[in-house]
Image: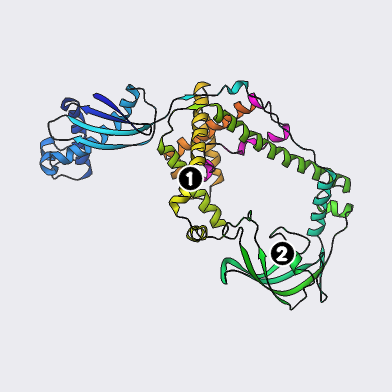
Amino acid sequence: MQITIKDLPQSQKELTIEISKEDMAPHIKWAAEELSKATSIEGFRPGKAPFDVIQKKYGDMKILEVAADKVVKQTFFQALKEKELDSVGPPQIKIEKMAPDNDFVYKATVSILPTIKLADWKKMKLERKPKAATEKEVEKVLTDLRKMQAKEVIVERPATKADKLVVDMDILLDKVPVEGGQSKNYAIYLDEDFYLPGLADKLINAKQGDLLEFQHDFPETFFNKMLAGKKGDFKVNVKAVYERTLADVNDDMAKALGQKNVEDLKKTIKENLEAESTQKEEQRVEIEMLQNIIKETTFGEVPELLITEEKHKMFAELKQNLDQQGISFEDYLKNLKKTEEEIAAGFSKGAEERAKTALALRQIAKEEKLLVSPEELKEEMQRVREMYKDNDKIDERLEDPEIQNFIATSLLNRQVLHLLKDTILGPAPVSLHAHQHDHHDHEGHDHSHHDHAHQS
């Protein structure tokens, strides 16, 4: 096998691979046998027909095509190993010369992983700064629990800030109904702004039977990007006003929530708030840690293929988030007055950062000689299998080498993250150890390997 290499832009290389006709001979023989097995030939058992009979039935070129497919798969990886090239993604194959009783020549264009000079991460230090829960935060949770157990009675008087309204509500933009903006029997607690800041204040003093029409601004940070920063027209039909009497904080309430008394209830709330705070702080320092490593790491040219893959993942995440909000991607583009290409251009920087994160984690694993054992992979695959035992295709999905590689990469990245955090942040707080197994795998994207295996 002869190999010549040509450098191309965007971290690509073109390999021209030539296999002599003598080396092709056993592959051609194998291809003929495979064709013989695939179709019954009169007078011969499957796979036992002589070469000249198969040649006459299928022709030289058909045999050569079957052989070429196998030869390319084998010799491409041999060529990478021989030339010590670290590729990413599938190659683009172009047959240059394929004729009976001749040398076989093809070209493979492949993206090559960039050279990486890692930051001196072993000297980096970051500090976790978890916060203790305040009395005010504990009292807020207690108030929320009191509201959950509140007694409600319909009243005919105008609503006060302590009341609940049940309404039918329509939201319009420029006199056009907003998709998903029609709500029937919608409950609005007038002492909360959880849905839309300031909306509740416009409904105080409303009473049963009122028909209200008004405009209201959606904040720039509103979760529904189609409405963010817009002025909406609201039509509200007040169907009922409920007076709410909040539950008393006493030992009976505590026992109903599984605690011995009020003191234990407050202690549990405080512990839960601090555990949540610790988890958020862990996520914050983890992101900062990775950003610092990427900032001080020197990368060769990142293959466009990797950046494009990350863009695709970011698109998938965007569409999933929009779908959860009941917004179609087409309406989203129309509202932003942008094309899909313009959205993709906006993803470029983030996609490159995500690709670099994945590359850095991979390089750290390589330099630190971290590996995923067959037993660890088998155990994780079993965990995924049990998680999706109701999916009749999960076994088939887990047989896919691509899925197995995806899971192995997730496990390896988890090892790298634990090493980085132990070195840069020090040991994790005790309360975090139970959560770390399911923590974000930082593969350069946000989908867990569980969901990846689950997709059919």
Magenta stretch, residue numbers: 423-452
Q: Where is residue 388 in the image (x, y as percent from the top left)?
A: 54, 47
Residue 405: numbered disc: none
Dominant secondary structure of the residues highlighted in magenta in the image: loop
Q: In which quarter of the image is residue 380?
A: top right
Q: In this view, does 326 lie above or below 86?
A: below
**Which class describes the residues within 10 Å of circle 2: few (<14), some (14-19), or many (20+)?**
some
In this rendered view, identify the residue nearer to me: 289 or 436: 289
Neighbourhood count class around disc 1 (C-alpha, 10 Å): few under 14, some 14–19, many 20 upward: some
The quarter of the picture where residue 417 lies is top right
Q: What residue type is labelled 1?
A: Lys
- The label nearer to you, 2 versus 1, is 2
- Label of residue 199 in the image: 2
256 over 383 or under it: above or below: below
Instruction: Please tell me whether residue 4 is drawn above or below residue 178 in the rendered image.
Output: above
Q: In this view, does 230 lie to the left or right of 66?
A: right
Total residue callouts: 2
Secondary structure beneath dot 2 equals loop
Expressed as whole percent of the image width and height from the top left, the position of residue 348 reads 48, 42
Using the rendered image of the protein, determine whether residue 47 is visible from the camera's viewpoint: no
Split into 4 quadrants, where in the image is the N terminus?
top left
The percent coordinates of residue 210 (x first, y second) are: 73, 77
Q: Residue 313 carries which label?
A: 1
User: In terms of secondary structure, where does tag 1 sit?
Assistant: helix
Mark 2 and mark 1 lie on one chain; the one further toward the N terminus is 2
